[in-house]
Amino acid sequence: MKGFFFMEKAIEVALENVISNHGGPFGAIVVKDGKIIGTGRNVVTASNDPTAHAEVQAIRAACQYLNDFQLIDCEIYTSCEPCPMCIGAIYWTRPKAVYYACTKEDAAKIGFDDQFIYEQLSLPIDQRNIPMKQISPNQYDLPFKTWEKSKDKKHY
């Protein structure tokens, strides 16, 4: 079964990442038409970039390969159930499917617990741990109005 082959590749990327000490135990690949078009590994600590998760890295590589910002007709294979940030990136790219090996509960057992983020997202904005408040100077919505009128915009 091809799904097992691609999942084994994602897990191999994750294992190599741990062995090489480049970051967390996470790997991901993007597949289109049976071909790997993007590979990503968690390099958060190696790059000092908290957004450098395996799925995001694989998405960036695949989008660059396709010269497109969406992954239509692609599949993502990842060594672990995606975190909330990666889920957001995945939805923006619109793949046809995502497959994962370990669960978020498995990740929590080894210190990668994203449950607090899920909980924070479900709270009203004024009850979250990190204050988020709107500031609206004059013409704060001018970029939106300009976008709305633009004839050159590319929807996504």
Image (cartoon, rainbow, N blue to C red):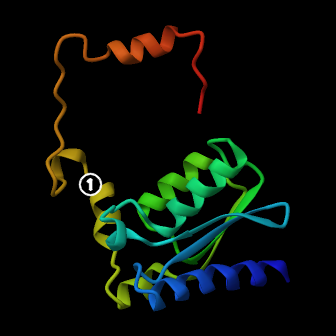
* Residue that appears at 49% across and 78% down: 26
**Element at label 1:** loop
For the N terminus, which image quadrant?
Answer: bottom right
Residue 94 visible within the image? no
- The mark tally for this picture is 1
Q: Is residue 24 above or below residue 35?
A: below
Residue at which label 1 appears? 123
> Viewer-proximal residue, 123 or 148?
148
Residue 69: quadrant of the picture: top right
> Viewer-proximal residue, 22 or 77?
22
> How far from the left and from the top, in percent, is residue 151?
59, 9
> How far from the left and from the top, in percent, is residue 137?
16, 17
Q: Is residue 140 above or below residue 31?
A: above
* Residue that appears at 56% across and 46% down: 92
> How far from the left and from the top, in percent, is residue 123?
26, 54
* Residue that appears at 65% across and 45% down: 70
Residue 113 visible within the image? yes
- In-image side of 113 versus 99 (left or right): left
Residue 145: quadrant of the picture: top left
Q: Is residue 73 above or below residue 81?
A: above
Q: Residues within 10 Å of mark 1 (few under 14, many from 20)?
A: few
- The three-letter code of the residue at mark 1 reads Leu
Q: Is residue 105 above or below residue 87?
A: below
- In-image side of 33 versus 79 (left or right): right
* Residue that appears at 54% across and 82% down: 14
> Viewer-proximal residue, 23 or 140?
23
